[in-house]
Amino acid sequence: MKKLFFILSLITNLCFGKQLFAQQLITVQNLVGVWQYGSPTVGDQLNQSFVFFKNGHFFFNNGKLGDDLVSTRGLKGRYRLDKNKMYFTIISRLLVDNANIDVATPEVESGIFLYKDIIPNEVFINGPKEIKDPVDLIVIKPNHIKINDEDYYKVSSRPDATKL
């Protein structure tokens, strides 16, 4: 009977502790770094990801450049935390420019089309304003957050080491 009580007590404490942790608010200090969408494992390059800097700036990487003619490489801007909400101000978009388009090799590359000779072109937003609607930010674990129901995993605490 004591073993059963101990096991039930342990399970209750683990579930309650996890629930309390999920309700915690993230701080700028904990947010700073590289957060990858969908997986805590980084392969040969980052997929969709956010890079948050301690000065309130961010970079959103829109996945692999070769994925079927996605012309927006990423977004640069500022973020602001307010409890479990995050607000964004988009300052510029990084577009793929002057690229030759080729067909992907099925056994080697993913997608149908690939960009070759990529020249990023940064287009600045005229009079950037904070987006009125915030995104929800939920802490699951110290290295796992949800941004509007999308899972992001912290893969680095060093945002300055990331190539923009």
Image (cartoon, grey):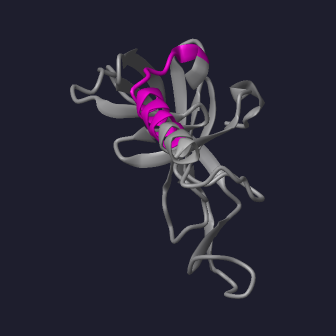
Residue drawn where x is 48% and y is 21% of the image: 26
Q: Is residue 57 above or below residue 162?
A: above
Identified at 52% across, 48% down, the residue is 4
Q: Position of residue 41 (x, y in %)?
A: 70, 53
Q: Is residue 65 left or right of residue 1?
A: right
Asked whether 2 or 11 is in front, the reply is: 2
Q: Is residue 77 above or below residue 73?
A: above
Q: Nearer the viewer, residue 9 or 158?
A: 9
Which region of the structure is painted magenta?
10-29
Q: Main secondary structure of the magenta part?
A: helix
At 52% from the left edge and 46% from the top edge, which residue is drawn?
1
In the visual, does 5 lie left or right of 81?
Answer: right
Task: Say if residue 89 shows up in the picture.
Answer: yes
Residue ranking furthest to the front: 1
Taking the spot 40% from the left edge, 17% from the top edge, the residue there is: 80
Residue 107, position as x, y percentages in the image = 73, 87
| Residue 39 in which image quadrant | bottom right
Residue at far top of view: 55
Quadrant housing the C terminus: top right
Q: Position of residue 100 (x, y in %)?
A: 63, 68
Can residue 75 be seen in the rendering of this structure?
no
Of residues 163 and 84, the one drawn nearer to the viewer in this rendering: 84
Q: Say above or below: 151 vs 135.
A: below
